[in-house]
């Protein structure tokens, strides 16, 4: 028994706080192309290293290299770039609209655009995502109308959710996007249940669960892993590790497990880490996991290593808890810049075309915003009726609610 | 007509529902091969296969959370929480997810699930096998809460709950599983096979949600009760000789207010009885509604008889349980005797 002195209480701390120099030298970044691509029916015990490494396709020169490369055509990659650029522009406009008082709240995706945009392209029609609040890329990449998203953000008269939900808590069954709760981690086990139902029904559809690094500490995350493991549910269990849960660094949720992907190993679930800022890598790993699910091989846990370059939400100020320049120091770079450079290297894109695309996208987003604002914003113009507040709670309104609606004079 | 225990009636309701609709699935702790600790799902796995009736890990939030996902897919899960006392880990999923899914998505996704759970005391179950948490559900917008009191109703209400398009909490008074317990714990209980409400028709029928039943017509006083307390109230009425009207609420939400108001306006007096703790119990809501709707007809203050505001004790079970003596005293006091 060495050191049997007083017990010491341990609270993990990030390497650097405001005022310090950002330092990610403790984040090992494997070379692009260095992590093997196993067969989808691999014995999870033989790929434990995948839970600790990082699968990367794009190297420093913007080339796609290694066994996970080569799945997407130039046209598909150009479309992916456009989706990410659209999401970033959409975010900038909506963030500004929030500052202008046109809505109460907004959450942006800055730096994480590749994760949802690329993942969406690995799914088939009819598959279902159970997203958190930072996966609007799933909608953008699936062609969901931006005007409808904005109508929801503005809670205006055309809001498909009738003003009942916080901004950005979208819902679209048609686009495989489960209603965002705003509650954390609850959707993770629901995704597993949806996948179980698909298997019970001998269907071919799969589910995708989404969670952030911080919320993996919730018990629903562990519930989901137990159920997914036990019933071999056709689900992809996504963990977006963007390093920060509001002001809490990822070490508080991760504890001593090394990585979030490693959580899956004890459940016998193949668990992979992927460069979340690498569109090609995200897509390739998502495709691998989706194929496993669709082939009755069960769940896969995927940790996307990325960085939340923006604030948690419009109510958050990250300069209070991390160095302002930390996002610049993030070693995996910016997903849009990386894909842009890759496409330029392929000879199908250029700085000029990129600038032109940025301008076109801005015009499109502004046009959508104008249309949405013609239906009202949170405090001005058309809005959902007070009557809508009472509707739609039950399929049939019970008598006590009918009485209350009468009391409210609507 | 065949007679069934409440367990057999509940099992029959699931059997009928599973037979009619392949979207109905049943799961929970011990419910698969074994058929549940109270045997309510016995035989269902053998009959419908492991995809339709199966064992779940001991994880209530997982059971309800996965059921919500299944319902969003299009199935109709009817899940069992082994005891209502175990539902707390699932409370987040029930109250913030199941209850609000239709509303928050404006009908894009819905949640037709039934969550069955044995409730109430009288079995020496102590703190963790005796609770009556119905008010924790009636307080939540978006849920429906049902408490049957007999095999006939249990079957019809459970089929109605499974067919309902919204989430239903189905509380099964476990002390009634085998007979109409009236609170006289020192006397033998009449089995359901000798009770008229043990008559349970074969096949499909429903008892509509939101409709109370008058168990005893009377003119002197109205007793509002549900679950086990219906029989305790009957015993108290017989022992006091008061001509009471006993209303078995059957569904707490939506509540059959019309039946309550009509009765209290007729009798002018009201006693509310439940096993759950008094403070902020469902009786408080009932009392407020009676006062709001019947004030000028009332001849006496509305009385409540409920569990004491302590955790459910073990050795002191019969001091805690609101038995016929306490209900009888409340009846006499409210009558002004």
Image (cartoon, coloured by chain):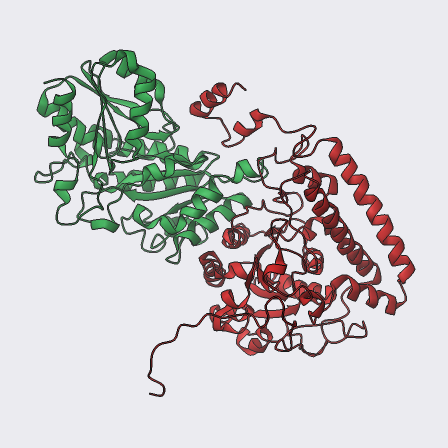
Chain colours: A red, B green
Residue B316 pos. (x, y %): 13, 46
Residue depicted at x 44% and y 58%: A219
Residue at horizontal 37 percent and vertical 52 percent from the top: B46
Task: Please indicate whether residue B101 sits to the left or right of residue B230 in the image.
Answer: right
For residue B204, which quarter of the picture? top left
Whether residue B22 can be seen here: no
Residue at image location 29% in from the left, 40% down from the top: B172
Q: Residue furthest bottom?
A: A2
- The answer to whether residue B159 is left or right of residue A395 is left
Q: Quadrant of the N terminus of chain B?
A: top left
**Residue A370 seen in the figure:** yes
Give me the residue at 54% from left, 20% from top. Answer: A410
* Residue B216 position in % (x across, y down): 21, 20
Residue at the far front: name it. A19
Answer with left or right where residue A357 lies relative to residue B93.
right
Please state the horizontal and vertical placement of residue A248, each as a whole percent of the image: 54, 62
Number of numbered tags placed on the structure image: 0
A20 or A270, which lies in front? A20
- Along the horizontal axis of the image, is A338 left or right of A192? right
Q: Is residue B175 above or below residue B206?
A: below
Task: Identify the image quadrant of residue B178.
Answer: top left
Quadrant (top left/top right/bottom left/bottom right) for the C terminus of chain B: top left
**Is residue B147 shown above or below A34?**
above
- Viewer-proximal residue among B9 and A175: A175
Residue B325 picture quarter: top left
* Above or below A251: residue B105: above
Picture coordinates of residue A346 (x, y %)? Answer: 87, 68
Q: Nearer the viewer, residue A17 or A58?
A: A17
């Amino acid at each position: 028994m060495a050191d049997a002195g007083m017990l010491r209480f341990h609270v993990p701390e990030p390497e650097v706080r405001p005022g310090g120099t950002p330092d990610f030298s403790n984040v090992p970044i494997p070379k692009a192309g260095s992590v093997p691509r196993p067969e989808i029916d691999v014995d999870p015990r033989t790929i434990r290293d995948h839970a600790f490494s990082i699968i990367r396709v794009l190297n420093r020169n913007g080339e796609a290299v290694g066994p996970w490369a080569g799945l997407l055509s130039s046209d598909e990659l150009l479309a992916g770039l456009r989706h990410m650029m659209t999401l970033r522009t959409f975010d900038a406009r909506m963030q500004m609209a929030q500052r202008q008082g046109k809505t109460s709240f907004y959450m942006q995706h800055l730096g994480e655009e590749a994760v949802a945009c690329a993942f969406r392209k690995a799914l088939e029609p009819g598959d279902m995502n159970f997203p958190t609040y930072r996966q609007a890329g799933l909608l953008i990449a699936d062609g969901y109308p931006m005007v409808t998203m904005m109508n929801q953000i503005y809670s205006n008269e055309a809001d498909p959710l009738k003003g009942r939900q916080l901004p950005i808590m979208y819902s679209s069954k048609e686009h495989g996007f489960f209603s965002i709760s705003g509650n954390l981690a609850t959707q993770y086990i629901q995704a597993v249940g949806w996948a179980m139902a698909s298997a019970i029904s001998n269907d071919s559809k799969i589910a995708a669960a989404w969670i952030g690094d911080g919320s993996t500490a919730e018990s629903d995350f562990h519930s989901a892993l137990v159920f997914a493991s036990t019933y071999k549910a056709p689900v992809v269990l996504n963990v977006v590790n963007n390093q920060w849960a509001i002001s809490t660094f990822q070490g508080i949720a991760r504890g001593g497990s090394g990585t979030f992907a490693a959580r899956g190993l004890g459940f016998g679930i193949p668990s992979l880490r992927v460069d979340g800022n690498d569109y090609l890598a995200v897509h390739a790993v998502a495709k691998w996991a989706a194929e496993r699910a669709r082939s009755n091989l069960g769940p896969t846990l995927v940790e996307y290593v990325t960085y939340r370059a923006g604030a948690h939400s419009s109510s958050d100020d990250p300069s209070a808890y991390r160095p302002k320049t930390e996002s610049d120091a993030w070693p995996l770079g910016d997903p849009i810049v990386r894909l842009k450079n890759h496409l330029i290297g392929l000879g199908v894109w250029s700085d000029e075309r990129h600038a032109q695309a940025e301008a076109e996208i801005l015009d499109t987003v502004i046009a959508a915003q104008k249309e949405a604002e013609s239906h009202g914003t949170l405090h001005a113009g058309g809005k959902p009726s007070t009557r809508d507040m009472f509707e739609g709670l039950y399929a049939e309104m019970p008598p006590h609610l009918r009485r209350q609606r009468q009391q409210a004079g609507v | 007509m065949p007679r069934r225990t409440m367990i057999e009636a509940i099992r029959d309701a699931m059997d009928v529902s599973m037979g009619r609709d392949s979207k109905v699935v049943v799961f929970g702790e011990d419910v698969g091969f074994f058929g549940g600790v109270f045997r309510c799902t016995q035989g269902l796995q053998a009959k419908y296969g492991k995809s339709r009736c199966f064992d779940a890990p001991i994880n209530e939030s997982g059971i309800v959370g996965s059921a919500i996902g299944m319902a969003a897919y299009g199935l109709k899960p009817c899940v069992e929480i082994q005891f209502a006392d175990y539902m707390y880990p699932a409370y987040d999923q029930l109250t913030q997810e199941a209850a609000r899914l239709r509303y928050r998505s404006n009908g894009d996704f819905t949640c037709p699930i039934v969550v069955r759970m044995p409730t109430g005391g009288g079995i020496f179950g102590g703190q963790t096998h005796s609770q009556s948490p119905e008010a924790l559900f009636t307080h939540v917008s978006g849920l429906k809460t049902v408490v049957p009191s007999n095999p006939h109703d249990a079957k019809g209400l459970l089929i109605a709950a499974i067919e309902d398009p919204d989430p239903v909490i189905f509380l099964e008074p476990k002390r009634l599983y085998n007979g109409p317990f009236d609170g006289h714990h020192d006397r033998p209980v009449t089995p359901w096979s000798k009770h008229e409400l043990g008559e349970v028709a074969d096949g499909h029928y429903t008892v509509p949600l939101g409709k109370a039943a008058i168990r005893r017509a009377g003119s002197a006083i109205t007793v509002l009760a549900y679950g086990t307390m219906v029989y305790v109230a009957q015993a108290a009425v017989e022992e006091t000789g008061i001509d009471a009207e006993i209303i078995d609420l059957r569904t707490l939400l939506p509540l059959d207010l019309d039946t309550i108001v009509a009765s209290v306006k007729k009798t002018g007096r009201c006693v509310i009885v439940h096993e759950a703790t008094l403070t902020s119990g469902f009786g408080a809501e009932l009392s407020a509604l009676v006062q709001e709707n019947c004030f000028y007809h009332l001849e006496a203050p509305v009385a409540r008889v409920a569990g004491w505001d302590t955790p459910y004790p073990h050795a002191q079970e019969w001091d805690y349980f609101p038995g016929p003596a306490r209900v009888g005293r409340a009846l006499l006091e409210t009558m002004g005797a």
